[in-house]
Every structure is written in C-alpha cells, then in structure tokens.
Amino acid sequence: MKTLWVILLDSYRMMNARKLFWVCIAMSLMVGLGYASVEFDETGYSIGFGMIHFENEFLTKGSPMAQWFYVMIFNEFFVKLWLGGGAILLAIVATASIFPELTKEGAIEVTLSKPVGRWTIFLAKFFGGCLFTFLQSLLFVTIVFIAVGLRVEVWNVTLFWAVPLVTFVFSMLFCVSALIGVMFRSEIFAIIGTLMLWCLSWSAQSFELIAYDLEVVKPNAGYKLNMQTAQLEKLPKGTKPKEPKLLPIAQVLEKPLPKTRAGAELLKRFIVFPDSGSGLESIDFESLRGGRSQSSVLQSMNKELNQRHSTAYVIWGSLAFITVILAIAGFLFVRKDY
Amino acid sequence: MSSPYVIDISNVRKTYSGGVEALRGVSLKVPRGEIFGLLGPNGAGKSTLIKILMTIIRASSCQGVMLGQPVGHKATLAKVGYLPEHVRFPEYLTGRQVIHYSAGLAGVPTRYAKKKTEELLEFVGMKTWAKKPMKTFSKGMKQRIGLAQALVNDPDIVFLDEPTDGVDPKGRKEMREALRELASEGRTVFVNSHLLGELEMICDSAAVMTQGEIVLQGSLSELIQSDGYTLSVEGDLSVDLQTKLERMQVKHENGELTVENKHLAQQLIDTLRASEVNILSMYKNKQSLEDMFLDAVEGMGPGAYQGESKKENKPNKEVVNKEVVS
Ligand SMILES: Nc1ncnc2c1ncn2[C@@H]1O[C@H](COP(=O)(O)OP(=O)(O)OP(=O)(O)O)[C@@H](O)[C@H]1O
Ligand SMILES: [Mg+2]
C-alpha cells in the first residue's frame, strides 16, 4: 500500500513538474465551466455567465425546450468531442512520459534495486495514469452535474457513469502507451504510437459500422443506399438480403482492437436524462442542422445500428485487449536487463 | 547470520543479449563489516556484477547468497543500499524528495525516514540545498545526495559504484570518513572504483576483475604484500661482489638490495655474509595497490572477453594463482 503511494506520488511529481498535470486539470475545469456558463432567463439564454445574451422565445428559463437544449448540447458536444476525444487525448499526452521516465537510464536502477517487485512497480505506474484520468473526468463531470442541476433542475447521477467509462476508454489506449514506453523509452513514440492505434481502432470500428449499416440494417429494413445519388432507395418487395461481403472483413479487423469508439458511445447508454416533455428527444444536432426531424424508419434503423454490439461485448472485448497488451508490456518490463 | 560473509557467490555468468560475455564465472566472498573494493579495468564487468546483485539485470547463471538469501530475493534488498554508476535522479525531485523516494520504496517507516533524511542531508553536507531540485545540482552534489539515499534504510550492505565520480577532494575525504564510519557500525561497504589510491586508504579487502573473471582477491594487507625482500647493507660493495649480485638478479640501489623471493633472499644473505658485508636490516616488500593492479591486469585492454585469441596475448601471470582468500 505504501509502495503504491510512493510510486503514485512520484508520478504526480513528474507530471506536476511538466506542468501537464495542472494544464489538464485546468482544461477540464474550463470546458466544464464553459458548459456551466450557459444560462437561461425569461427572454432567452446567455453564454459565458451572462456575457453574451441571445433572445429566444423557446429557450427560456424553466421551459421543456431549454431542458432538451441543455442536455442536447451536452450529448452532442461535450460527450462526443470532450469526453470521447479531447479529454482522452489530453490524458494520453499528459501520461505518455510515465513509462519513459520510469525506465530512464540512471533512474531505473534505483527503483529496481528496492524490495519491490517489478510487476508492482509496473502496475502501480499504470494505475497512476488511470487514476489521473479518473480524477480529471471526475472534476469535469462534477461541474456538469452541478450545472445541469442548477440550470434545468435535473439532478442526474447517471452522469457519473462518464467517469469510469472515460477512464476505461483511456486505459485501452494507455496500455499501448505503456507498451511503447517500456519498449522504446520514448515519450514521443508513445504518443504517436498510441494515437496511431486510436485512429486505427476508430477506422476499424467505423468501417464495421458502415458495413453493418449497408449490408445488414438497411437491407433488413427493405432499403438500399444508392451510391451515386447518396439517397435511400426502397428495395422491391420480397428481395432477399444478400450475404454480407464487407462485414466479415470489417469484423475481423474490429474484433481484436480496443473498442474506443463504441466505449465512448456507451456513455449514451449509461447516461439517461428524463424526458424533457418538449417532444424533441429524437432530435440531435445533425437533424437540427438539416432542419428536419428523422423519419421513424431512419430512427429505428439508427437504433438497430447503435445497438448492434452489446455492452458486454464492448467491455469484455476491450478488457481482453487491455489484458493482453498489459501482459506483454509488463512481461517486457519485468524481463528486461536495465 | 551465521556466515561470516555477507556475499558468497560462485559461478556468476552473464552474457548480454548482444553476445557479450560480461561475466565468466565469478566467485566472490565479501566478509561482513568490511570495506570491500572491486577493482578492474573499464568494461571488466564490475557494474554488471553489482547490477545482478541488485536484481537490475538477470544473471545467466548465479549460485550463492547475499545476506543469507539467494541472489534475486527481493525482500533482502530492504537491507541493502545502492548508489548506481552514472546515477541520474529524476530532475523534478528535490534532494530531500530523492531520499524520501528511496526510503519509501525500501519500506522505511515514514516518521523514521523523515528523521533519517535530515540526518543524512547533514551528513553529506547538503542540508542547505535540500529544497532545490536535482537539475540545479552539480555532479558532485548529485553524488552526495546519491550516497544519502543509499543509506536511508540503514543498510547492512551498501553498494557504491564509482561513488567519488565528480566529487571534489574534500568531498572524497568526507566520503572516505563516511565509509569508515559505516564499517565501524558493522555495515559492509562494497565499492567499485578505479581510484586505487583512494581504495588503498580505506579498503579492508579487495578483488581484481578483468574480462569478467576475478583474478585476485584477498585482504588488502595480503594483496599489497609481495614476495620480495629488501636488505640494507653497510658500506660500499666491492666491484667483484656487485657483478656477482647482478648475476643473481639482485637489484642494487642506494645501499639497498632487493630480491624477488625468499629463496633468493637466503642466497643473498649467504653471499653477503661470505663477503663479510654487514646487513643492517631486512624487510618484506610491499607494493602499492596500483602496482598490484597493473600487475594483475597486465596485457589486457578494456572491455569484455573477446574470445581465446586475446587471452593468448595475456602473459602467464603468477598473480592469478595467488588466491589468498582465507
Ligand atoms: N546493456 C548491455 N548490453 C550489452 N553489453 C553490455 C551492457 N552493459 C555492459 N555491457 C558490456 O559488458 C561489459 C562489462 O560492462 P560493465 O559496465 O560491467 O563494466 P565495468 O567493469 O563496470 O566498467 P567501467 O569501469 O567502465 O564502469 C562491457 O564489455 C560492456 O560492453
Ligand atoms: Mg562500471
């Protein structure tokens, strides 16, 4: 226990010295406060704690529309861009130096000559990185929780699911950072390699999503996408769905990789807001921009698409990835002559 | 605790992944409570040996014990201190934090570690600098902090790999005194160094390693003893006698006659007495640690063992057989 504390303290000191610890915390704070700064009053809403005011007859204090709007911008911007992207990116950059610093020549000798097992050291360092992300997102979510409570009077504790989920997605990437850090002792390599894997897994998941959409969801619903016009066309009645061709390839690619995207999308499953009563629940930012609501067919197709993977699949699949990568990285660290 | 040796290892081998045979069957016994010096040319394998004992690298084979436990036993390291060669403590830590970190990982109770840290900072003369980060320290200052962190757990045995690297003369003297004090407390000090003069001043025993093998080990007094004798005589020697002595391979300088071993010494005495020369004194020769070292490593360049061809160049040294371990 004490060893863990000593190693965590050391990691903190390192990140603190690189200013990254506080930069990340400050960024989280700012984004959280940015969200909290949206206010509603009798005539409309304002951002920046009342700095810029917009007149709006629907988005007023206490209106169901305002509640829907406030939740919608959280889901659309803060979940997708921040929790599923920015916050994790920041955490990857901030924690990338943990393993290269640990294994630095001249410093590792002291650490290894102590009566502490190498697995303990390795896992404590890994745990430290995850703890950092946990705290960073806890801070953010707490601000959002209070903001939503104050602004639209919904005290939604399911928001806190974001903390373990974001940490989980982060750990899928951090294990890769650890592996590269242990292998090459380089922070830059760790960052680049991790981002490459993130892109790769994102692409594989997107490919699988598109393939599933085109080859399973749409034909099942009796539609096909016309590639020239990019319009949906109704298939003639009684057309049998074709055997998927791309999907098996996509699945082979997607299976072994961490489910970073699907993991972030779990946020939508876990964070549930009560119905605002505005009748706008199905409207998201895309349809808002397009100026039209989605047809019920599209909605049900989207629903099927989004639920093609069970929560268990996403979690266990990613856990398997983390376990394998951590085992390799840990094994290398434990076996290496320094 | 029954064994008089804190380190008793044999047949330690290490072949690095590149194929370098850094250690080729090292056997070593280090007596408790002594200052032990491990000498050897660059690349002989001294640091490799220490790193094996510190579990930093894995031996290809290793038999024997350290503090009564097999080498590689992690818990034993709680009673061991270590100052690595070319140590580079994290730059973001202050001097005090480095010592605390070391204490924390060694399992020293927090309150005791705090007290001990202050004592040690005083001891290595870094008290006023303790709050400054490592990156602002000179080489010698880092080395002083390094010594302090190696001692924070009150080790039974402390390994110092080139401890005086970068330390000024005053610091070296202080370090020597520090090591003596440690030894007087019953701790064993294991020093790797090239600075023979310095080792000579403090070591109780030593070993010489070249190309991954121990070629010589024993107590310092035994090591620096030579088989030779020196006789001083009264008056000048006749030309006749001088040529005779030359033939007997006796060195003659300022009225002192030197021979290489005791047999020659007897002959010399007989010859001198036959010529009625007065012998004023006779004593057994000592050599400096440096002479001993240079003798032991004669004909060997730096680096690890490079195969038989190099070994053949090595003069057949008697010194190899002069194992004087009790
Ligand atoms: N990590 C490594 N990989 C491969 N070879 C190594 C490694 N470390 C050391 N060696 C080789 O092992 C041999 C012994 O090295 P070691 O550092 O133990 O020597 P040393 O006696 O401490 O030398 P010095 O007095 O210069 O510090 C050298 O030939 C060196 O080239
Ligand atoms: Mg060395």
Image: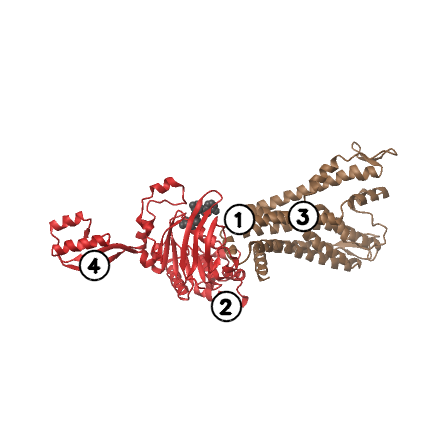
Pointer 2 chain: B
Using the rendered image of the protein, determine whether residue A327 is visible from the camera's viewpoint: yes
Shown in brown, the chain is A
Marks 2, 4: nearer the viewer: 4
Does the Cβ of the disc 2 residue fall within 8 Å of ligand 2? no
Which residue does the numbered mark 2 point to in the structure image?
A: B115
Which residue does the numbered mark 1 point to in the structure image?
A: A336
Which residue does the numbered mark 3 point to in the structure image?
A: A320
Pointer 3 chain: A
Kindly identify the amino acid type of the residue bearing the numbered disc 3. Answer: Ala
Instruction: Pinpoint residue A53: horizontal percent, then vertical percent.
Output: 77, 53
Is A147 left or right of B206, judged from the image as shown? right
Kindly identify the amino acid type of the residue bearing the numbered disc 1. Answer: Lys
Pointer 1 chain: A
Marks 1, 2: nearer the viewer: 1
> Rounded to the nearest whole Å, what is the CA distance between mark 1 and mark 2?
35 Å
Which residue does the numbered mark 4 point to in the structure image?
A: B282
Kindly identify the amino acid type of the residue bearing the numbered disc 2. Answer: Lys
